[in-house]
Amino acid sequence: MQLSIQNKLIFPLILLSFITASTFGWQWFRSQNRVYSLAIAAGSPQGEYYAFAKALAQVVARHQPKIQIEVLETEGSLENLELLSDERVQLALIQSDNILSPSTKAIASLFPEISHLIVAKESNIDSFSELKGKKIALMPPRSGSYQLFWSLSSHYGLTELDLEAVAYPPAKAHAALLERKVDALFRVIALGNPGVSQLLHHGQTDLVAIKQGAALQLFRPALFPSQIPQGTYNGAVPIPAKDLPVVAVEAVLVTREDIPHSIVYEITRILFEARNELVKQNIQAAMISQPSESSHLSLSFHEGAKTYYNQDRPSFLVEYAEFLGLLLSLIVLCISGIWQLKMWWQGRQKNRADLYNLEILQLIAQINSMEDLEQLILVRRHLFEILAKVIVDLDEDRVSPESFQSFTFTWKIAMKAASHQETILRN
């Protein structure tokens, strides 16, 4: 009797097992072949956000074809956060001084954004306080630049009644200043922006310092003191004429908390592991940093990004637990050989960095004895070429992070020596 009952149960159990296995198999197959279409809220096509977003979309598609990113034109940070909150986009580029909802999570700090106060020469504006009674061109109202301007105005004792502010898209704002429809323009953007450079090359405008950066940071912690280095926008006749104190914020890539862990992990991985390709398309990518590398970023990070930063992969360990168990004995036997290989590789990385350092030291010796300004400019250009090579070597693991830190210290000394020698020669 029992045998008969057992025989009757066998077929349903087999059928149930087959259905269960088929369901899990189909789900696995679907997840492996699904293409994720994401949208990123960027900014104006003339801005750095849009250019960076375009580069990111192309590099991500090249390295992970299952992730396709559409770049959306917007007014700026505030609109980007609105689109993210309304679930109309999955990614957004914002300024680090924006107030975020708990569901908004950071992926990476991208590059510093510098405040630019550009004035018409005949306006006689030499400081932020002297904007009183003037007409100012601002970026669109839902941009980070617009919001930051009013924060700075409050610090300097200016209200909306003290000046006339007009919001324009970037290109129209630049044109308005050149046509003297406004006295000044305020914009927050990465150094070296082509539009800003073109605006300053007309000879009708000047950059004005924004001082008191440390004091401003007290009430707006995401701000930090920075500077526009001498000659950033022209080297022959330096624009600015000397290092100009300003304030800055970080450009940050953010997402929503509900975006899949694996998607954010892949985007984070590509940001760092394909950084060399990003740099070729957008030089700002050279400054992408992990959370621990940024003293100005106090945002909550997405779990997918944190997994990459911590190199913590529990899903991998669970999936391959049995296989790893079989390999454990081999790993124990090979560990001494791996250690020796690691020591050899680290020595090779250090030797490569030492060669760069020696080259820099030779250039420093040349700089201190130079008497020709054109030669000095060539040496400075060579220093930037060396930096580019080292960044490539760092991305391709030919130079260790520790050796890179040592190199940057020597490189900065060389740049300071070049600036000092240039000052001597110009005087």
Image (cartoon, rainbow, N blue to C red):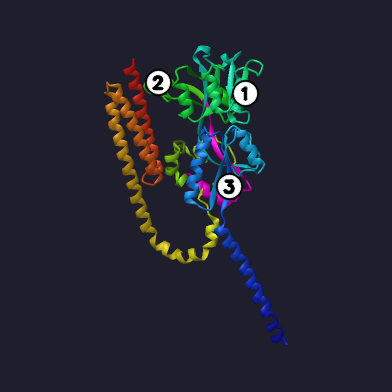
| Residue at mark 1 to residue at mark 3: CA–CA distance | 33 Å
Question: Foreground: 57 or 31?
Answer: 57
Task: Please report the residue visible at 37 percent of the width from the left and 52 percent of the height from the top.
Answer: 342
Q: Quadrant of the C terminus?
A: top left
Asked which secondary structure carries label 1, the reply is: helix
| Residue at mark 1 to residue at mark 2: CA–CA distance | 30 Å
x and y, in percent, of residue 281 in the image:
44, 40
Q: In this view, does 114 lie above or below 121?
A: below
Mark 3, residue position: 38
Task: Please report the residue visible at 42 percent of the width from the left and 19 percent of the height from the top.
Answer: 242
Q: In this view, does 381 lie above or below 351?
A: above
Question: Foreground: 189 or 312?
Answer: 189
Answer with left or right where residue 397 lies relative to residue 22: left
Q: In this view, does 408 lie above or below 153?
A: below
Question: Which of disc 2 and disc 1 is earlier in sequence?
Answer: 1
Local crowd at mark 2 within 10 Å, few (<14), some, or many (≥20)? some
Local crowd at mark 3 within 10 Å, few (<14), some, or many (≥20)? some
Q: In this view, does 339 lie above or below 106?
A: below
Mark 1, residue position: 150
Question: Which of disc 3 and disc 1 is earlier in sequence?
Answer: 3
Task: Please report the residue visible at 46 percent of the width from the left and 22 percent of the height from the top.
Answer: 200
Does the image show residue 286?
yes
Q: Do the residues labelled 1 and 2 touch (CB within 8 Å)?
A: no
Q: What amino acid type should be assigned to the residue bearing mark 1? A: Trp
Mark 2, residue position: 238
Task: Please report the residue visible at 73 percent of the width from the left and 88 percent of the height from the top.
Answer: 1
Q: What amino acid type should be assigned to the residue bearing mark 3? A: Leu
